[in-house]
Image (tube, rainbow, N blue to C red):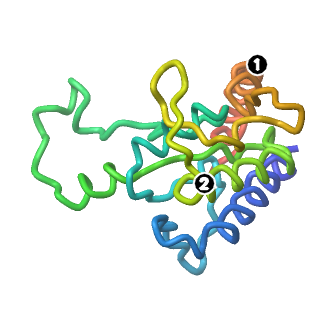
Amino acid sequence: HTNEILKKHRDNSAFYRKAFRDISWITLLREDDGFVSSSWLFTMMVKDAEPFMEYMKANGVMASKVHRRNDTHPVTRQFRRPLPNVDAFYEQMVCLPVGWWVTKEDREYIVKLVRSFRSGVSGKKDAKGAVVDYYAGTDEKGKGRNVTIERASKILPDILRLRDVIYRDLP
């Protein structure tokens, strides 16, 4: 069962890598030979990361940094040192949904949104002031879509159980 789930994660990740490899304002993370990611997250570097994440959220896709730097937590704050490369990475880091619950339709919608961020942004803003695209945030009937936020909240207990299984199975 775990292998099937990991395959879905990796398939979604490969789909994104192929779809985003030619976008100049996205930097994909290096994949070294001999290593295979579990693709628990799809992390990439995005110029203008904050507006990008707002845009994705306004269009129903959760995109975030997921984690804070370890040295910003109270218990490790005393060890904080200047780390300019980490700062530069964190400033542009964005994670997209890549899990087994992301359907083929979801990932195509996510790719459409990513591609439209720079090319099709209308400048319109939603009620919270986030920039939204004039077409990407609706389905064919003109209703708003929420690809992952609702679904992820419903399946969080399953995700946590899967995490526990994966860690238990590690050597």
How would you rate the neighbour count of disc 1 (Cα within 10 Å): few for under 14, some for 14-19, many for 20 or more?
few
Which-is-in-front pick, marks 1 and 2? 2
- Name the foreground residue: 135 vs 146: 135
Height in image: 60 above or below 39? above
Q: Earlier in the sequence, mark 1 or mark 2?
A: 2
Q: Amino acid at mark 2?
A: Gly
The residue wearing badge 1 is 154
- Name the foreground residue: 86 vs 105: 105
Query: Which element carries disc 2, helix, strand or loop?
Result: loop
CA gap between label 1 and label 2 equals: 31 Å
Residue at 24% x, 52% y is: 87
- Name the foreground residue: 145 vs 90: 145
For residue 16, which quarter of the picture?
Answer: bottom right
Expressed as whole percent of the image width and height from the top left, the position of residue 162 reads 73, 34
Label annotation for residue 120 = 2
Height in image: 101 above or below 152? below
Height in image: 21 above or below 57? below
Query: Which element carries disc 1, helix, strand or loop?
Result: helix
For residue 39, which quarter of the picture?
Answer: bottom right
Residue at 69% x, 71% y is: 18
How would you rate the neighbour count of disc 2 (Cα within 10 Å): few for under 14, some for 14-19, many for 20 or more?
some
Quadrant holding the N terminus:
top right
Expressed as whole percent of the image width and height from the top left, the position of residue 37 reads 62, 61
